[in-house]
Every structure is written in C-alpha cells, then in structure tokens.
Amino acid sequence: MGGGRAVCFIGCVHSCDPAHEQFPIISAAFSEFNPQTVLIEGARPFAAQLPKREFERQKAAILAENNDSLIRKAAEILYVARLALEHDMSLYSPEPPLAESVAHVSKVCAAPLEKILLYLVCAELGVLYRKGIGGNRQVSRDVECIVDCLKKDLAGMTSEIRLSSLDSCALKYLNYSSLTEVPAEVIFRLMTPFGNHPLVDVAVNFSHYRDLHLFAEIFRRVEAKERVFVCYGRTHLLKLRPALDAYMRRFSALRAEH
C-alpha cells in the first residue's frame, strides 16, 4: 500500500494453523517487496535494542525451528520474524512498554486498575486458547503464569495480583463467578476493540495506543527511506489504512517535488 511502494502492510488473521492460506501469501509478498525493515506485532524480545549476544541467541532459537512449529507457537509473528532473520533484515516490534500503556489507558478512559488487569489477563488467555491450549481445567495455572509476567512488566504499579481478586473482577465486570467459568468464545470477544462487551473501553484504548506507536514507527522508517514490511493483525490495518494512505500520498508528492 502507499505510493512508491515504501510500505507493504499485511493484515493477518492470528491463526496458529500452519495450513492457513495466509502464510504462502505472506511469504510471496515478502519476497516480492524485498524490504529493508520488518515490523512485527507483539514480539517482546524484539521491542527493544537487544545486546548482541542476546539477539544472536534469540535469532538462533528461531532459525533452529521449522515454520510449522513457529506458527503453532505464535501464529504469523515468529514466522515473519524468521523470514527477516534469514535475510539479515532489520527486525523490530514497535509495541509500547506495557506499564506505559496501562498508565495511558488508565488516564484516558478512567478505568480502574482492576478492570485493566482483568482485560490483560483475558487477552493473554485468548492467545492460549487460540493456540488450542489451556482450558477450564487448567485456567488457574494459566492465570498464574500470566500474572507472573504481569508482575514483572508492571513492577511498582500494582499491589499483589491474586487469582481470587481476578475472580472477583470476573463477577463484577463479566457476571461470571470466576475466570474458570468464562467460555473461550467470550474471552475472544473481550480481546477485541469493538462490539459491546464489558471491557471494550479498555480494549479500544489499548488498541489505539498501540496503533499510534506503530504509525509513528512506520513514519520514522519511511522518512529514513527504508522499505518497510509490516505484519500485524487485520484490525490494525483496517484502522490505520486511511491515515497511512493519506501519509504515503503526501510523502510521494514531496519526494516528487525534490
């Protein structure tokens, strides 16, 4: 998309099925576009400048796995990361730090921290369910793992997060007596930034803040005259496309003038 083919943005379905039709399309678009920079969604290890040794460790781990295994683990994210790493291209995930996002959402929509934490846990549970793992019988263990990660990411922002307090939030906001009772299809709906679900205000503002960071990173790379390959969920493309198209038309016009 965009004038001059400075940006190729693939809007993906977050499918963990290696047989999904999108993966040959992604590969073909990548080869045809031949980018210099690749932006991927949600890959924490690539959201910051890693020390060289750690980067090489992450790179070796990804390249050691086959595509089917990477897709089952992280849908298109690690699949595209492998494409970039195989060709020694710049790879980056422009996701904002979680603590920064939480502070922003809390301020913008005045949501209580407990509601934001409930959304974050539901979003991570949804990722597990999308992979075909997890489920009610082990949801307590799943939540414990998610909470451990949140404690690290939100250090200093929250008091102790417990499953019992999250269950209270599930009753308060979702009308389920515990997280173990929330069906997977409800979890999936709670992840989305649209519709009329109880956490939609939080979901919308998280999504918007992430989109702002993504757009800023695309802008920065294009201004540096890089060809940018972006692989994000299709919702992000649908929301950003009007702004990106307008920007690329203006960028192409300015480049033609000079």
Image (tube, helix red, strand yellow):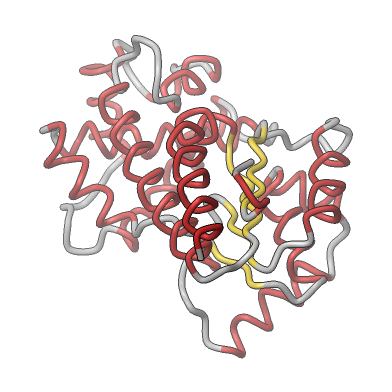
Residue at 85% across, 30% down: 21
Q: Quadrant of the N terminus?
A: top right
Rendered view: 132 above or below 209? above
**Who is closer to the viewer here, 142 or 210?**
210
Q: Quadrant of residue 205?
A: top left
Q: Quadrant of residue 121?
A: top left
Rendered view: 146 above or below 240? below
Residue at 65% across, 62% down: 227
In the rendered image, residue 191, in percent from the top left (x then y), is placed at 44, 27
In the rendered image, residue 185, in percent from the top left (x then y), is placed at 54, 15
Residue at 41% across, 22% down: 190
Rendered view: 175 above or below 59? above
Residue at 52% across, 47% down: 248
Rendered view: 95 above or below 176? below
In the rendered image, residue 159, in percent from the top left (x then y), is placed at 16, 52
Q: Quadrant of residue 25?
A: top right
**Who is closer to the viewer here, 13 or 152?**
13
Instruction: Looking at this view, name the residue that lies furthest to the front.
Output: 257
**Who is closer to the viewer here, 239 or 55?**
239
**Who is closer to the viewer here, 11 or 105?**
11
Left or right for 101, reference 146: left
Left or right for 227, reference 190: right
Left or right for 92, reference 164: right
